Image (cartoon, rainbow, N blue to C red):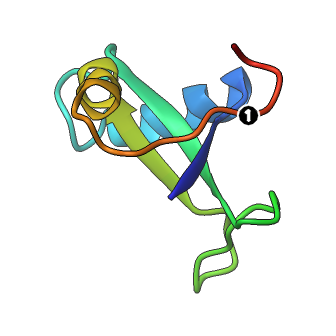
């Protein structure tokens, strides 16, 4: 899964909707799902696919030993 952090205005809107279903969204971030060529992945309903993860979930993934990539130029 290739992810890109959503722009602040998109994240704010998505988390506002998520707050209707979750009691506390303050530690969550919105990520847009991308295709391998870098274009946005589109859901069956025609909207850009998104995932919401907590900071802890991202940290757990990084420190889990699973393979992940960083964009070129980040060292």
Residue drawn at x 75%, y 61% is 40
Q: Residue 25, how many percent across, how many down?
A: 31, 23
Please identify the quarter of the rendering in which residue 60 is found: top left
Q: Mark 1 points at which residue?
A: 71
Q: Residue 74, how many percent across, how many down?
A: 73, 18
Q: Looking at the image, how many numbered discs can be counted on the residues?
A: 1
Q: Residue 21, how many percent across, how many down?
A: 23, 44
In depth, the one of 19 and 49 nearer the eye is 49
The residue furthest left is: 23
**Mark 1 burial class by Cα count in 10 Å: few <14, some 14-19, many 20+:** few
Residue drawn at x 57%, y 26% is 12
Looking at the rendered structure, the secondary structure element under dot 1 is: loop
In depth, the one of 52 and 59 nearer the eye is 59
Residue drawn at x 26%, y 36% is 65
Q: Residue 6, how many percent across, how many down?
A: 66, 34
Q: Name the side, left or right, on which 33 lies relative to 72.
A: left
Please identify the quarter of the rendering in which residue 19 is found: top left
Q: In this view, does 68 lie above or below 63?
A: below
Which quadrant holds the C terminus? top right
Q: Is residue 45 above or below residue 13?
A: below
In depth, the one of 11 and 71 nearer the eye is 71
Residue drawn at x 35%, y 36% is 53
């Amino acid at each position: 899964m290739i992810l890109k952090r959503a722009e602040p205005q998109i994240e704010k809107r998505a988390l506002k909707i998520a707050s209707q279903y979750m009691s506390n969204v303050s530690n969550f971030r919105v990520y847009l799902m991308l295709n391998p060529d870098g274009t946005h992945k589109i859901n069956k309903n025609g909207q850009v696919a998104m995932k919401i993860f907590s900071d802890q979930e991202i940290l757990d993934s990084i420190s889990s030993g699973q393979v992940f990539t960083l964009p070129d130029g980040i060292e």
